[in-house]
Amino acid sequence: MSTDAAHKSASQGGNGGDEHFEPRILVFCCNWCSYAGADLAGVSRLQMPPYFRVIRTMCSARVDPEFIMRAFQKGADGVLVAGCHPADCHYIGGNYRTRRRMALMKVLLQQFGFDPDRLRLEWVSAGEGEKFQKTIIEFTNTIKELGVSPMKGGE
Amino acid sequence: MAEKIKIAQYWGAGCGGCDVALLDIDAKILDVHAIAEVVFWPIGFDGKLHDIENMPDKSITVSFYNGAIRNSENEHVAKVLRQKSVIMISFGSCACYGGTPGLANVTNKQEVFQTVYKDTQSTDNAAGVMPLTHSKVKEGELELPEFYDTVKTLDEVVDVDYFMPGCPPTVNLIAMAVDAVAQHVTKGTPLPPKGAVIASDKTLCDECKRERVEKGRKIERIYQAYEITPDPKKCLLDQGIICIGPATRAGCGAMCPNAQMPCRGCMGPTKGVMEQGASMLSALSSLLGMTDSEAGLSEESIMNIMLQVKDPLGTFYAFTLPKSLLKRTVTEKKKKKTVT
Ligand code: SF4
Ligand code: SF4
Ligand code: SF4
Ligand code: FES
């Protein structure tokens, strides 16, 4: 995707009239696959909307649900967790725990009043720079559509 | 013997169980009587708040505050007792974590009033009378405490010296606390460090005598406690009954699992953990529905496995919602999607 196209597709999301909403998105990447994938996206100069910050953890399973809660408490508009594809986790089964947690976290966040789409899980391998880019663009669009976190702008 | 110390006990938004628990210490109550005079205890005798307000600061040695902070009166009394007391103890799960009343943080004042004063079957309120903080009547103006939108913990409104979790705290833990205070007053023994939780630093599972599967632990499916007759010796969680033990602080002696009931988490999070709910969610997610062919499972089937947990918020935060990171529910401006 070209630079312009990437920027455009990220800013096009129907953002409910809030043209200037610059979401704050937190991305957890596991060290062995997704961080390398994100890095590849970077060195390949793939363009992405600049609203995310990456935190590297050794495995996606290191992302304690408490981290996600803390991110939302601090006002994150969206949280993305990226890990190795099933069967590829460096620690054999970390990502199997991750996906169970993330499924239940979505239900829990919904009970807390958040749109469950503010939390997303994606498998990104070390070779998938483009998938990382695509994921960031899509997720940014989703968050732009949802608007500012209800922790900040809601009730 | 020197002059008796003064103690106070108050209930905020609680059920009264904590007040009664203090009496459950049997003969130990005589130790309390030997060293202490109770100056304020609304459930026990008629005392007036203004008498306490008129006491010199720090003239009460220990205040035991139970119940959560639900309205302005709870908060006001907490502040008065804090000012008048040397030691402020957050007594019971409601004061420490919000407890059962804290579950009201999934709703708000308006909805609570709507249900209580309008919608319930037994309510006959055709005129739609709602509580007001100030109302004028013939005889003058009446005042009621302000009901808050959000239930708070005691330590959100005042500085707390010690925390005694439990719904209510068990006799052992109360005796421990009473002993510590008595030793301090009579022999000058140092008190525990400020902020200490008067309980165990272990996890409830460490205290529970049920046998856990050591290797390859997994849960095939979830059962409600009434659906099966659990094996009396084996870990309840291993048998598919959600037991909050892995995410709960020890100290109660694992009373509920001993009585064939799963732990619901009243002792609150374990040491160093902020979110009891998130911690239990984690523990359960590592066990539930694990197969030998994980890589082949679709994301939908994973969601279906996890949807066996019917009410994660109510299950994992049964006692700690106001103490959780998010504290209460929020409202999205536009609701887009729901997972089912
Ligand atoms: S902690 Fe339990 S026993 Fe104590 S007041 Fe609250 S609900 Fe009642
Ligand atoms: S999960 Fe419950 S039953 Fe099992 S060991 Fe822990 S406290 Fe005991
Ligand atoms: S077993 Fe759990 S719910 Fe029961 S008293 Fe102990 S901490 Fe509370
Ligand atoms: S190391 Fe990548 S998910 Fe475990």
Image (spheres, rainbow, N blue to C red):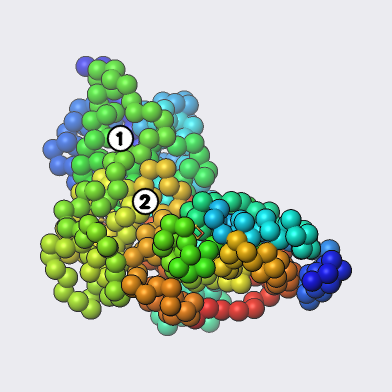
Quarter of the figure that contains the N terminus of chain A: bottom right
Q: Chain of mark 1?
A: B
Q: Residue at x 48, y 26 (%)?
A: B57
Q: Which residue is painted at 20% across and 27% down in the image?
A: B34
* B268 horizontally vs A23: left or right: left
| Residue B166 locus on image (x, y percent) | 31, 50
Q: Amino acid at mark 2?
A: Gly
- Pick whichever, B258 or B39, lies toward us: B258
Say whether residue B159 is left or right of residue B166: right
In the rendered image, residue B301, in percent from the top left (x then y), is placed at 44, 80
Quadrant into which the C terminus of chain A falls: bottom right
Q: Residue at (15%, 42%) from the top-left corner?
A: B26
- Residue situated in front as seen by the camera: B188 or B264: B264
Residue that badge 1 annotates: B38
Q: Residue at x 19, y 37 (%)?
A: B29
Callout 2: chain: B
